[in-house]
């Protein structure tokens, strides 16, 4: 319960709601790993997620928002690298290998 | 944008959802005052809110959850004491003086 996750979002863009939703998803999935999840209002189109001080998502850099399974994976890679996310991981593998499994089913 | 608010909630009691809702209410109302709002999972029935290091609510001590207008007032008292919360403050005054205004209308 010691990891720290931060979601830095643009208030002008009205991204509080999606950020708060992502916060709840992360706190639920990583109930035993996350010690603090901080919502940090910002400006200028910022949307960044940090896990234990490492930036795991930047909307500016990646050009888009993560989908929620993707976000869980990049956060997991930092705060609980040995942990499997179960069907989320399987769906990604299937997708990467050209499987027919639909992304929607992975959530 | 420099104040720090923290909501410490019991995961066993499943208080994440209400805490995340309160977080969104506070971040919306105090958009210019709050620099960080942290959700902190805990255990043992904890529900506490801190504003700039001062405890403004303790469910153990007060014996109940705050209603949302009450929470905004106690947070305001610490992070923006000069700021009026408009109809919320008026409704409280009316209530305290035995006025007929209903609390529900203050939200």
Image: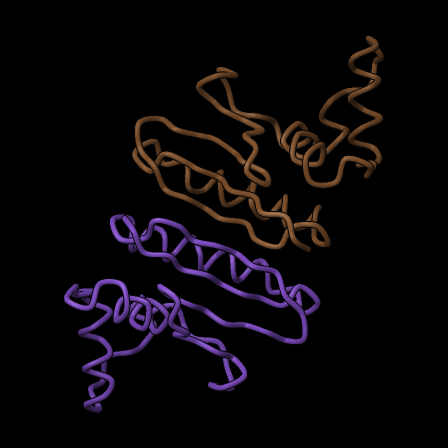
Chain colours: A purple, B brown
> Measured from the top left, where is residue B105 in percent x and y?
77, 28
Question: Could you say which quadrant of the image residue B25 lies in?
Answer: top right
Residue at (83, 36) in percent of width and height: B84
Residue at image position (49%, 39%) is: B7
Is B61 rendered above or below residue B13? above
**Residue B49 as seen in the image, left or right of residue A23:** right
Where is residue A33? Give x, y as percent: 26, 53
- Please state the total of marks drawn on the protein image: 0
Please state which of residues B17 and B78 is positioned toward the viewer in this rendering. B78
Figure check: A29 above or below A71? above
**Who is closer to the viewer here, B104 or B44?**
B44
Which quadrant holds residue B91? top right
Q: Give left or right: position of A69 versus B79.
A: left
Q: Position of residue A28 (x, y in %)?
A: 33, 51
Q: At 70% from the left edge and 53% from the top edge, which residue is drawn? A: B31
Please tell me which residue lies in front, A49 or A28: A49
Q: Position of residue B73 (x, y in %)?
A: 70, 31
């Amino acid at each position: 319960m010691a990891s720290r996750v931060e979601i830095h979002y643009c208030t002008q863009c009205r991204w509080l709601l999606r950020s708060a939703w992502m916060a709840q998803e992360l706190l639920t999935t990583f109930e035993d790993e996350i010690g603090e999840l901080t919502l940090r209002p910002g400006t200028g189109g910022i949307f960044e997620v940090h896990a234990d001080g490492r930036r795991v998502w930047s909307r500016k850099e990646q050009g888009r928002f993560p989908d929620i399974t993707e976000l869980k994976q990049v956060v997991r890679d930092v705060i609980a690298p040995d942990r499997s996310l179960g069907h989320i991981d399987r769906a990604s593998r299937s997708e990467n290998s050209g499987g027919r499994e639909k992304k929607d089913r992975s959530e």
